[in-house]
Structure formats: C-alpha cells, structure tokens
Image (spheres, helix red, strand yellow):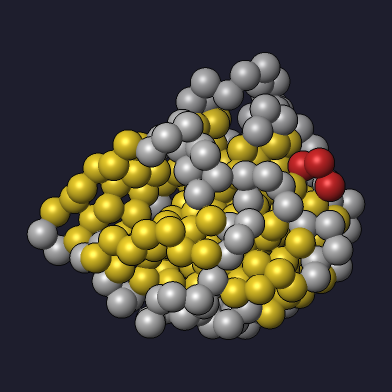
Amino acid sequence: MRNGAPSPVIAKIERLEVRRGGRVIINEFELTAEAGEVIGLAVDGSTVVATTDGASDVVLQDSDLSGSPRVYRSGSEQSLTGIVRDKPRHRILASGFEPYVWIWNEDGPDAIAKLEATGPLWNVLQSADDQSIIAIGGVTPSLWTTTSLEPLGLLDGHTDLAVGGCLTASGLLITVSRDKTARVWDVEKRRALMTIPGAQSVAIDAAGTSVTFVDTTGSRAWSMPN
C-alpha cells in the first residue's frame, strides 16, 4: 500500500495486475513485495496470496488492504515457484525448486507438512475434484491426497523435467516438459490420454476451455470440452 495512505475498503476486485519488481495492483492501490517479481498469485474476493521470485516466504493479504500481511515461511534455501490457497481447509500450499510442496494452516507461520517430489517444481495445483495435490516438476509429477496428504503416485511418461502444467474445466491435467512434448492426463487414473509433440509451454484461459501450446515455430490453440 502507498506509504501514509489510509487502508482503503475494496468491495470488489475490478482490476488486478501483476508487474515486474514484485508489484501487485488491486484496483487503484498497490502492494509491493519485499523483493523480486511476483511469480505466484491466488485471488478470491477477500484475500490475495503472493510469493515473489527469489523468496522462500508466502504472503497472505486481505484484499481491502486492512491489517498486516500474514507471512508463511518455508525455510527453503531456494525460491518458491507457485502457490494454491486451499480455502475449504484453511491452508496455503506452495511449490519450490528444492523440491518440495510446503503446506501451512492459515493461522500459523510454520509449515505443517513438507511433501517431497521427484525433482525441481515449477508449480502446484489441486485437482478439479479437490481430491489430489499435484506437483508439477521432476520427470514424473507427483500426487498426494488433499486430506491425509498420503502419496497417490506418479505421472509416468515424460523423459525430461516437467516445467509447466494446467487444469482444464473438465478436470484434465496438461503438462509440458523439456522433452518437448505435452501430455494430457486423467488425474484420477494417473494415466496419459494423449501426447502432443513439439510443445514447450502451455497456457489456458480463465474458463479452462481454450489451451495454447507454444514452441519455437509458433503457437497452437485447442478448444477443450467443458
């Protein structure tokens, strides 16, 4: 928030931007991270959760900018890479290069669990049915149950590090790897449904129905079923 400015009341987030230098713009107000670029962001109507490039902490800030930010510390010597807010369970999840998924209760600064994956992580997701935690990274992305945090297994198929992933509106998981392929997964069955050659990165629209694959020659857009 701007120095010396009173805490504004924001009834609705109408404008949200993430900019280089660790800056988050909410409507006409600005939050500035301690250092680096904001690389993980989760937003709902009441809170903003962010972690910055080079940082090993996660910050939870009320979206009306009132009160002090809550800080969750991983103790990692490497930066965090992605975050999820598990609102039904009042938890914060974060992935990192170290490579682990850290889990915190919202009311405490120290992690309650540290789940080890198979390699450096680029992101963490929760499955569409809210049953699985998905760690995107390593050659084989890892899965755990959201409730007991027990291992569910690995997604075998890539031959090099998985470096990105997203979930479609229908619940399918798409991962991309340094092996220059994308794979479409049935998460519940932990089975690859399709391999897409040539993909190096993937992006999905807010509705979860339009997927764009990018490689050195350009991009390809796919429409996914709801």
In the rendered image of this protein, does residue 99 appear above or below residue 40? below
Q: Quadrant of residue 87?
A: top right
How many marks overall?
A: 0
Q: Nearer the viewer, residue 103 or 9?
A: 103
Q: Residue at 55% of width from left, 45% of height from top? A: 171
Q: Is residue 99 visible?
A: yes
Q: Is residue 3 visible?
A: no
Q: Quadrant of residue 224?
A: top left
Q: Nearer the viewer, residue 167 or 94?
A: 167
Expressed as whole percent of the image width and height from the top left, the position of residue 203 reads 36, 48
In the rendered image of this protein, does residue 148 appear above or below residue 179? above
Expressed as whole percent of the image width and height from the top left, the position of residue 27 reads 52, 25
Q: Residue at 58% of width from left, 65% of height from top? A: 190
In the rendered image of this protein, does residue 130 appear above or below residue 51? above
In the rendered image of this protein, does residue 196 appear above or below residue 6? below
Q: Residue at 63% of width from left, 51% of height from top? A: 127
Q: Residue at 65% of width from left, 33% of height from top? A: 44
Q: Residue furthest left?
A: 217
Q: Is residue 16 left or right of residue 44?
A: left
Expressed as whole percent of the image width and height from the top left, the position of residue 162 reads 43, 72
Q: Is residue 3 left or right of residue 46?
A: left
Q: Report the quarter where the N terminus lies.
A: top right
